[in-house]
Image (cartoon, rainbow, N blue to C red):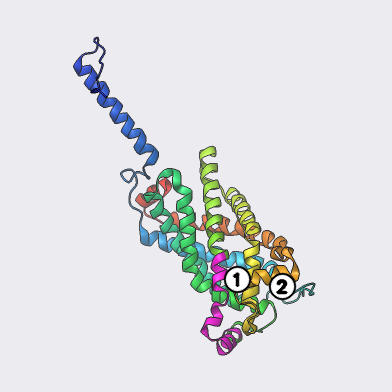
Amino acid sequence: MGPLTLFVDAKSSPADFSGSHKSKICNSQWDQRKFFASISTSEEKPFNFLRVLFEGVIAGGTAGVIVETALYPIDTIKTRLQAARGGGEILLKGLYSGLAGNLAGVLPASALFVGVYEPTKQKLLRSFPENLSAIAHLTAGAIGGVAASLIRVPTEVVKQRMQTGQFASAPDAVHLIVAKEGFKGLYAGYGSFLLRDLPFDAIQFCIYEQLRLGYKLAAKRDLNDPENAIIGAFAGALTGAITTPLDVIKTRLMVQGSANQYKGIFDCVQTLVREEGPSALLKGIGPRVLWIGIGGSIFFGVLERTKQLLAQRRPEAEKANSKQQ
């Protein structure tokens, strides 16, 4: 193979060729950087980590408490449907049973989740290519879910056992669970909880953030409260339906107590399908989709509104920076 030969138009001077060649190379490199590079750090100031963490904690805790209080009765019905074996009767009394104790866990769990999610999301969006923003949202949601699970799981165990009538109060539930099952009893079903909640958190927040970004680009303006609520409702309902089988498994493992009816996740699935049929994995899907759909609407609506109110209290320089994020 002979040496490569470079042909140059005779009408073009060496200086013209050199300038145009450099220009093409520069444009080519710029196009590649524009497609693959992450968000430009030269145009965006570093975000204030502590402020984002603080605002996330406040906004998350507020949204979590409001949505949990509003929709607790639906959650109670869903839990009783999933815990009932065969054609067991569903009681409609005491639908707010365990709410006070649950709020004591929901407040710090929601605050911790959003407090971890928001700064993690912003850090990842600056590290990932722009066309991989969905991966950043998925990852941030999963990391936030892992952090919050340390509080969520004991709260969920106590709540669901009170909803199914096993205990009369949250303090009694904690005391008796630890006495009979040890401290690990408060983390019953932890594996199945992560199996359900990590995909749920990641998918729900990814769907919400991506729909919100797409709508914002199409509308060429910031979203208002009703629009945030509608997108939140859609993201919540869709994710709730997809993860219903995981929720059923988690509920059965958490409410079994010291009886140890199921040996683990796979044994629970096999036993459910064998004794009650495959449809048992979709128990409570109606109340779950309704609950999470409405909950998503309230949660994201309150979350965005609270974030906006907190952002208004920032110094002017940080307000301008936050509008770019």
Image height of 61 relative to 15, above or below: below
Q: What span is colored magenta in the figure?
A: 173-195
Image height of 236 relative to 174, above or below: above
- Evaluate whether residue 98 shows in this view: no
Please give the residue where the numbered disc 2 appears in the rendered image: 80
Q: Amino acid at mark 1?
A: Ile
Q: Residues within 10 Å of mark 2 (few under 14, many from 20)?
A: many
In the rendering, at what x and y percent does residue 221 appear? 51, 41
Q: Residues within 10 Å of mark 1 (few under 14, many from 20)?
A: some
Q: Is residue 56 left or right of residue 1?
A: right
In the rendering, at what x and y percent does residue 153 appear? 55, 73
In the rendering, at what x and y percent does residue 203 appear? 55, 55
Please give the residue where the numbered disc 1 appears in the rendered image: 265
Residue furthest toward the bottom? 179
Q: Amino acid at mark 2?
A: Arg
Image height of 41 relative to 264, above or below: above
Residue 180's quadrant in the figure?
Answer: bottom right
Q: Is residue 168 left or right of residue 62?
A: right
Residue 275's quadrant in the figure?
Answer: bottom right
Residue 176 lies in the magenta stretch: yes
Residue 285 lies in the magenta stretch: no
How many numbered marks does the figure carry? 2
